[in-house]
Image (cartoon, rainbow, N blue to C red):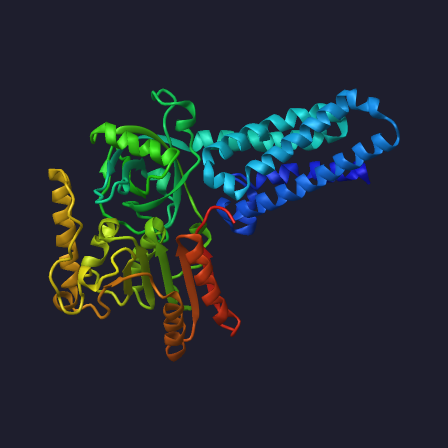
Amino acid sequence: MTKRFGIVAASQLPLHYLLAAKSWSPLHYLLRMSHEELNPYHRLLGRILIAFFSAHAIFYINFYIQSDLLHRFRSQTVILGLIAIGTFVLIGTSSLQWLRDKSYLLFFILHVTLSMFLLPILWFHVTHLRVYVVEAALVYILMIAQRRISQTPTLASLSLLPSSGKAHGLLEISFPLPRSKLRNYKPGHHIYLGLPPDMPRKPWEKLRFNPFTIASSSAINNSNNNALSASATTQPTTGNAKTHTSSLLIRPMRSSTAVLASIAESSKNQPTPVLIEGPYGSTSYFPDLSSSRFSRILLVAGGVGATFTLPIYRDLLVRRNGHGVRFVWSVRGQEEAAWALDSFLNDESEAVIDIHLTTDTSPSTIPSLHNQTPQPTLPNTSMSTNDEDNTIELEERTALLSHSQDDEGKPNPPKLNPGRPDLCAIVKEVFEDDEEGEGGKIAVLICGPGGMGKVLRAEVGKWVKQGRDVFWHAEQFGW
C-alpha cells in the first residue's frame, strides 16, 4: 500500500499539469470551461497529490525506522524521494492564499521553477514512474511552447488617469492587435501582458503572469455577432491586413502592475513595446445571453471589475436593446468611473443602470439624475494642466449623464447613488420583477471583491432554493 500511494499520485501528474494549460487543453472543450475556471481543480488535485506523496514518504520512513534500516537513507532512491516530497511541500506552501496575496511574483516563480525541477527528480527516483514523468514533461513543454507561440509583439500606449489621492489613478493601456488575433474575441475576455526580452528591465518584471480583462475592443466578430465594438474603426496595416485597438484599465498595486505604472510615468506618452498573449476567457463557453430564455440579466461589478461586466453590458445593448438588463457598479469615486461614463451618455435602451460611489456618501456630492442639480464637487487638489482638462471633461460627462433623462427620454435613466449597493434589495427587485413578467431564466454575473461575491451568491442562492432557474458566473482567478 505504501508503494501504491506514490504510484497513484505520480499517475495523476499529467492531468495535474494539463489543468494548468491556458488554451490548447482538450479539457477546455470537453468540460466547456476556461483555464481560470479549471484552476481551482488544479489546486485541489495538487493538494490531493501532496497528501498521497506525503503518506508514501511517511509510511516508508516509518518502515525504515522500525525495521532498523536507517542505512537506506543514504541510498539515491531515498535521498531523491525526500527531495521530491520536500519540493512538493514547498510548492503547496507557496500556493497558500496569504502568500499569493503577499507576493504573487514569488508564488509564480517558485511554482513554475519547482514544477520543472520536480520532473527530473522523479525520473531518477524510481524507474516505474518514468512513463508518467514523460507524459507530464510533454504537457509542460507544450504549455511553454503554446504560450510563446501565442504571444504577439505590439506597441502600447500607457497613461495614468488623474487621481485626487496620493496613490496612482487607474492605468489605461491601449494597443493594436491583428484582426486574426481577435477573431475569437468575446466580451469579457482577458489577456496576459509582458515585456520583450531586450527591454532594459529586471527579468522577473517581464513575465506574463497577471490576467487583464479587455475593457474595450474595436474587434467585431461578424460570424456570431458576439463581440461588441467599442469603436467601429479598424486601422489598416499592410495589404488587406487590419488591426483592432483594445484597451485595458488596471489599478496599479504592486509587482507587475507597479512596473507598468512606472513605465507609464517615464514613457511620456511614447509607445512602449509589449507582448500580448490571449485573449482567453470563460465567456467563450457562455450560453447565449441575448436569447429569449433569459428574461433578466443582472451584471454586478466592483471597481475595475467593470472591465469584465461593461463589455458584456454593451454587447447586450446591441443584441437585445438592454431588455431585462440591470447593471450595478460599485466604485470608489467619480474619477474612477470617468472612463466608462461615455457608455451611458447616448444609451436609450431599456437597461437599468445603478452606479454607487462608495466614498461619496454625502448626497450633496452626488449629481441628481432626476432633478438636474449642479455639477458634483470634486476634491480640490493641485493638478497639472492636463489633469485640470481631464477633470473638466469628467464634469462635462457627468453633466451630460445627469441630463440624459429629459434630453434623451431613456425609460430607465442612469442613477448615481451614494454609498455601497444594497445587494439584498437589488436581487429581490430583479427576481420579483421577473415573477411579475416573463418568469424565465435569470443570469447573474459578477466581477469584484471576494466579499461582494459572497454576499451576492448568498442572496441569489435564496432564490435558487425556491426553484428559480439561474445562470451564475463569478469572474475570478482562484477559489
* Picture layout, residue 245 above or below residue 467: above
The location of residue 306, given as percent across then percent down, is: 33, 52
Q: Residue furthest bottom?
A: 436
* Picture layout, residue 98 above or below residue 75: below
- Answer whether residue 22 is visible to the viewer in this image: no
Along the viewing direction, whichever of 247 and 366 lies nearer the viewer = 366
Q: Residue furthest right?
A: 67
- Answer whether residue 350 is visible to the viewer in this image: yes
In the figure, is residue 70 to the left or right of 301? right
Q: Which quadrant of the structure image shows residue 118? A: top right
Along the viewing direction, whichever of 352 and 258 lies nearer the viewer = 258
Quadrant of image for the N terminus: top right
Q: How many marks?
A: 0
Residue at coordinates 32% horizontally, 57% vertically from top-left?
A: 330
The location of residue 342, given as percent across then percent down, is: 20, 53
Along the viewing direction, whichever of 251 and 379 lies nearer the viewer = 379
* Picture layout, residue 320 above or below residue 26: below
Residue at coordinates 46% horizontally, 36% vertically from top-left?
A: 104
The location of residue 247, given as percent across then percent down, is: 29, 42
The location of residue 173, given as percent across then percent down, is: 28, 38
In the figure, is residue 422 to the left or right of 103? left
Residue at coordinates 36% horizontally, 20% vertically from top-left?
A: 198
Q: Which quadrant of the structure image shows residue 212? A: top left
